[in-house]
Image: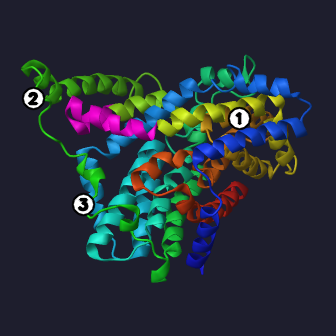
Amino acid sequence: MISRLGLLISRAFRSVMPDPFVLAVVLTFATIALALLLTPTPFPKVIDAWSSDLGIWSLLKFAMQMSLILVTGYALATSPPVARLTRRLAQLPTTGANAAALVAVLATTTGVLNWGLGLIVGAVAAREVGAAMHRKGISVHYPLLAAAGYLGLMVWHGGFSGTAPLKVTRAADIAEIFGATPPISAIPLDRTLFSPMNLFITGGLLILLPLIMAALAPRDAVAIQRAESFGISDNDGVVASAEPTGGGDDRKPLLPRLLEDTPWISWALVLLIAIWAWRYYFPGDRPSGIRELTPDTVNLTMLGFGLLLHRTPMSYVRAVERAAKGAAGIILQFPLYAGIMGIMGATGLTALFATSLAAIGTGGTLPLTTFFSAAVVNIFVPSGGGQWAIQGPIAMHSAIAAGIDPAKMVMAVAYGDQLTNMLQPFWALPLLAITKVQARDIVGYTAVAMLAGAAWIALGLLLF
C-alpha cells in the first residue's frame, strides 16, 4: 500500500514539477503578488525591496558559506578512502527495499554531521547502489534510491551544521539578527543540538526514514525504473573519478609538478588547520568550541579532513572543480531566493505568515505552530540562515512572551526549515546532477517521508 502511494504521488509530481530555476522565478512573482494583495505596500516599494542590498544581493556571504559547505562536503565524500568505503557498502543490498534503506542510512547519518557531506554521500551512494544492483541483476527503483539520498536534508538542521542553533551560540551572531537589544542571550549547543528533545527527534528520524524508504520500494516489476534507464552504467564514474590519477601535466617543469603531486604541501596546510582545531575544540582554559560551532568553523574543519584524505594538492583541486558544478544552482538561484526574502521581510509578509500561524497555538502548542509556520516559510525561502534572519526574531519574542524556553523555539524553526526541503528542490540540485534524475522523479517519495517526519517531529515537540 505504501509503495503504491509513493508511486502515485511521484507520478503526480512528475506531471507538474518544473525545473528548480523556473520554480524560483514562479515563487518570485507569487511572492510579489502576495505582498501586493496582503500588505499595503505599493508596487514600487516591493521592487525596491527585491532589488536592494537587503534583497537580491543580501545573501552573498551566506551563499559563499553554503557553496563551501557543499564543495568541501563533496570533496570529502569523493576522497579515495570515503569513496572506496561507499563502493564497498553499495555491494551489500540484496533487494530493492534494503538498497533504499542503506542509501537513506548513509545520507541521514552523514547529513547530521554536515549537510553538504550528507547530500553528496547520499547522491554518490544512490548512484553506486544503483550501478551495483544492475551488475547483480537485481531490480531496484532508481528514483527511490535518489530520493533516499536526499534525506540528509531532512535531518541536517538538527545536526552539527544546523544554521539556527549555530547562529545563537555567540552574542555577536545574535546581535547581527536581533540588533543592539536582543531578547535572548547566547544559547549553548547543549540546550539545542544536544538537548534530550533533539536527541529524541533527530535520533528517531535516523531510524524512521530508512524504514519509510524500504516500505516505498515498488513490488511491481512494471513500475520499476532501473539505473540504466537514467544513463548509469555498470562502471559508475563517481567513485572512479575520486581515485588518484597519478602525475600531473608532463609539459610542466619538474618543480611545479613535484609541488603539485607531493602530499607535503597539503599536509602543511592540514597541520595549520590542526593547530587551529586543537586550540578551538580543546582550548583548556575555556569551554570547547564545539558548543559554538559556526558555518565558518565547520567549513575549515571539512577543508582539513578533505585535504588529509586526498593527500595531494591537485587531487583536492580536481575534486573541488567537480564540486563547483554542483554549486551552480546556489550561485544562480540564491539571489532569487534572497530577493524573495527581501520582499517578505520588508513588506511584513513573513511576519504576517508566521504570526498568523503562531497565533493559532496556545503557550503549550506555540512550538508546534512555529514548526508548521517555518515549514511554510521554507518553501519560499529555502535557506536556513535566511529563514532564521526573518523568523528568528518573531520566534524568540513569542517565546519570551509565552514563557517558553527560547532554545526549544530555535529548534522548532530548525525542524520546520528542514521538513519542506522534501518539497523544495533547491538543495537537491547537486544530487540531481550526480544521480542524473529530475526533481519530479524523486519528490513524490520525499513527500511521503516528509509527512511521516512531520508526525514524528510534532510528537517530539509535544512531549518535551
Q: Which residues are magenta?
A: 304-327
In this rendering, position of residue 260 left or right of residue 175: left
Disc 3 crowd rating (10 Å Cα; few below 14, some 14-19, many 20+) is: few
Looking at the rendered structure, the kind of residue marked 2 is: Asp
Secondary structure mainly formed by the magenta segment: helix
Looking at the rendered structure, the kind of residue marked 3 is: Asn
Q: Which mark is residue 235?
A: 3
Query: Between disc 3 and disc 1, whose residue precedes?
Result: 3
Q: Position of residue 358 (x, y in %)?
A: 83, 46
In this rendering, position of residue 278 left or right of residue 447: left
Q: Which residue is mark 2?
A: 250
Q: Which residue is mark 1?
A: 340
Query: Between disc 2 and disc 1, whose residue precedes?
Result: 2
Residue 188 visible at all = no
Looking at the rendered structure, the kind of residue marked 1 is: Ile
127 drawn magenta: no
Query: Between disc 2 and disc 3, whose residue precedes?
Result: 3
Residue at mark 3 to residue at mark 1: CA–CA distance: 42 Å
Disc number lying in front (2 or 1) = 2
**What residue do we see at 58% from left, 60% from top?**
443
Q: Position of residue 148 (x, y in %)?
A: 48, 61
